[in-house]
Amino acid sequence: MKKNITTSCLVLLSLFILSGCSKIYTALGDKNMEQLQYVKAAKNYEKAVSKKSDNVAQKKLANTYRLMNETKKGVDAYAKVINQPNAEPIDRFYYAQMLIANKKHSEAATILREYIKSNPGDKMAENMLKSCEAPEAFMKDTAKYIVTNAKIGNVTEFYGPVQYKDGLVISASIDGKGKDKVPQTGKSYYKLYFTKKDKSGSYSAPEKINGNINKNKLHTASATYSKDGSVVYYTTSNTDGLSNAELLENVIGLKINKDTIANGSYLKAAEFPYNSKSYSVGHPALTADSKTMYFISDMPGGMGGTDVYETKWEGGKWAQPTNLGEKINSAGNEMYPFVDSLGNLYFSSNGHKSLGGLDIYKAMKTGNSWSQIENLNYPINSSRDDFGFMMYADSKTGYLSSNREGTDKIYEFILQASKVNIGGKIVSKVDGKPIAGAKIAVTDKARNITDTIVSAEDGSYAYALAPNTDFDVTVSKDGFFSQSEDITTVNQVGDITKDFSLEELVKGRPVVIDQVDDKGVRPIFYDYDKSEIRPDAFEALNKLVKRLKDNPKVTIELSSHTDCRGTDNYNQDLSFRRAKSAKNYIVSKGIKANRIKTKGYGESQPVNKCVDGILCNDDEYQANRRTEFKVIEIDK
């Protein structure tokens, strides 16, 4: 009995000691987190949960892994957190993020559905769920880009390449020493370095840029240069007015600085006028003419997180910035804007539909509005963070940054000139039978070069189109009306299917003009005692114009009619005026007048019973007030 009591006491004492140790390590981790020392904090939280099952320490450990971007450890940690009594909905959201980063989209979708039940209307979560439910949508053309690791030596982490002279300026970190060591990572603060690629494809050892640009006590990164290379804007930690002690105790924001460059020396010029101690401003990107700058900020009034803003150089200063709005910005973070030589905007975001983490997106500007954003998909994007995109003026080669291999690195890419296949079948509109031997003329509109192929016995055809090009495709066959279509491969992903249904070309036969679901001959109609073209006739006339342009050897007759009301002579004249009105419209669209013959038939050819002496309703009269079209000549 005494032995049992002694054993029980020892067990209780051990539990008390372990409980106390757990709290001590948790407290130490908390202190580390206050100073943003994530690595040390994680080690202390790990010790805390190893000593005792501690729900509080477990959640803090999971959050620390997330902040460190240790996603594999984060998956295991959050899997435990979400089953704890102290679990909150946001824990499921973070768990889903970790799962996505590890390509576990199906599991993430299940977690997100649970999260959305308690947080309906969360746009970020809804976009994440849509991405998880259809991850294959980001794999549409995996051969479009070739992406390779840019092996730049002497630096451990690097990102954000920008073209400068004959090389690149990159944001890089090396193994930290003394004051240069970042508490969170143990590596050096990011600074700007210069490197260039030789003819063999090797990069020179990065050299730290001297002068004012790298003098900030903490980070300096994300540069953008004017076209002539005399001015540079860049991002630094906003350390103004902070002591060394305060640098360890505060969450430091970002600001944009400007330097001038003379004889290779970087001289301090000015701060960006919209910097603030209350919010961050950073990641500047100049347009080719240096008259517009894009940057990111979490200033008040945004869409959520950091947004992309635009400012213009007007009157010798930067104008008041404007938020790019909801087409670009989301409830998440938009970061690292870049503008190519054509004015297209690239940026990263974790708030739109993505493969996971930050993805790179493209938007084109038309006038004052932006196009729908385009996810650049795999392999430009991955399930991790992809950002820091830049493209050379050739619009084919460039760089991006990514932590897809665990740490921030720069990758080269080449846009493949992949062909877009077009194909389909050519059949007769009369009976649907295939038309063999039809000529398919494919014209590159920009270069005015035409290539011709013919359809096979089963009416099929196939052709490889060049990417990012506009084409005219015209199908012709003796005894049929030729037919053309405008085809574009600009921003085209995947192949194109286009079938053609050709109408027989027979002299004296009415021309079939399809309208909506009407597959028969449909004339155009007129109001009572009027010869003006009605709005509902323009669709048919425009299709007739296209038919005539596709078939320049065809001459047609416009046959016009009236209802039976009025005298024969008056109706004869009215029908002619109706034909003339239709001809004038067709000629105004570029068809030669000698290809259009006009004839008025008055009331002599009704399509129903409505003749003199027969009382009809409005619809029956209307059916006779018409102009029909028929082929009367076919030049050889």
Image: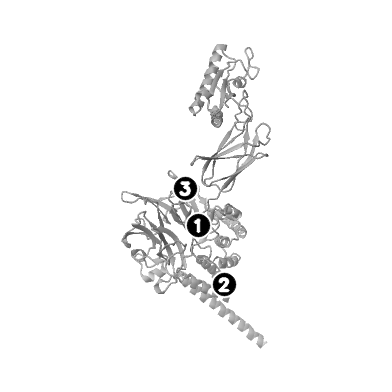
Image quadrant containing the N terminus? bottom right
Image quadrant containing the C terminus? top right
Q: Which mark is residue 120?
A: none
Left or right relative to 328: residue 509: right
Q: Secondary structure at mark 3?
A: loop
Q: Position of residue 627 (x, y in %)?
A: 57, 22
Residue 70 seen in the figure: yes
- According to the picture, the residue beneath numbered tag 3 turns out to be 364
| Pick the front one: 446 or 358 | 446
Sequence order check, earlier mark of 2 and 3: 2
Q: Is residue 175 above or below residue 385?
A: below
Q: Which mark is residue 54?
A: 2
Q: Secondary structure at mark 1?
A: strand
The kind of residue tagged 3 is: Met
The kind of residue tagged 2 is: Asp
- Comparing marks 3 and 1, which lies closer to the viewer? 1
- Comparing marks 1 and 2, which lies closer to the viewer? 1
* Total numbered badges shown on the rendered structure: 3
Left or right relative to 33: residue 89: right
Q: Quick one: label 2, few (<14), some, or many (20+) residues within 10 Å?
A: some
Q: Position of residue 532 (x, y in %)?
A: 51, 22
Identity of the residue furthest to the bottom in this view: 2
- According to the picture, the residue beneath numbered tag 1 turns out to be 413
Q: Position of residue 418 (x, y in %)?
A: 55, 50
Q: Secondary structure at mark 2?
A: loop
Identity of the residue furthest to the front in this view: 636
Q: Is residue 427 above or below residue 413?
A: above
Residue 303 seen in the figure: no
